[in-house]
Image: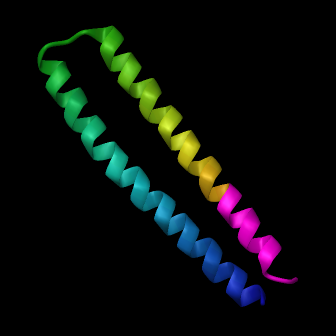
Amino acid sequence: MVFQKNILTVIIILISVFLFVIIDRPVEHLINRIVTNPTSEFIQFIFVFSLIVKAVIIAVAIKILLKIRKIIPQ
């Protein structure tokens, strides 16, 4: 059972890292485009927005992990 939990934890971590990469690429592209025509408020908005999205993904991953741990008997 411990082995099963460890596999699930690794899978959830991999999924969250994959989502980070998917979100980071468009944000980096936008920032690169804005740097050529800088408006600092917009860059800050995008940066804060990406941090919020990452925080939400982490929260969702933790919730899923906790649900899976409740389902699997210890």
In this view, 8 is above or below 30: below
Residue drawn at point x = 18 percent, y = 29 percent:
32
In this view, 72 is above or below 37: below
Residue drawn at point x = 82 percent, y = 72 percent:
70
Question: From the image, which quarter does the N terminus lie in?
Answer: bottom right
Residue 48 placement (x, y as % from top left): 46, 25
In this view, 27 is above or below 47: below
Residue drawn at point x = 36 percent, y = 46 percent:
23
Name the dominant secondary structure of the magenta segment: helix
**Is 26 on the left or on the right of 24, as rendered?**
left
**Is 9 on the left or on the right of 23, as rendered?**
right
Q: How is the image coloured?
A: rainbow
Question: From the image, which quarter does the C terminus lie in?
Answer: bottom right
Q: In the current view of this chain or complex, which residue is farthest to the left?
A: 36
Residue 21 is a magenta residue: no
Which of 70/49 is in front? 70
Region of the chain picked out in magenta, as a range: 63-74
In this view, 74 is above or below 27: below
Q: Quadrant of residue 2?
A: bottom right
**Is 6 on the left or on the right of 54, as rendered?**
right
Residue drawn at point x = 35 percent, y = 9 percent:
41
Residue 64 placement (x, y as % from top left): 66, 62
Residue 69 is a magenta residue: yes
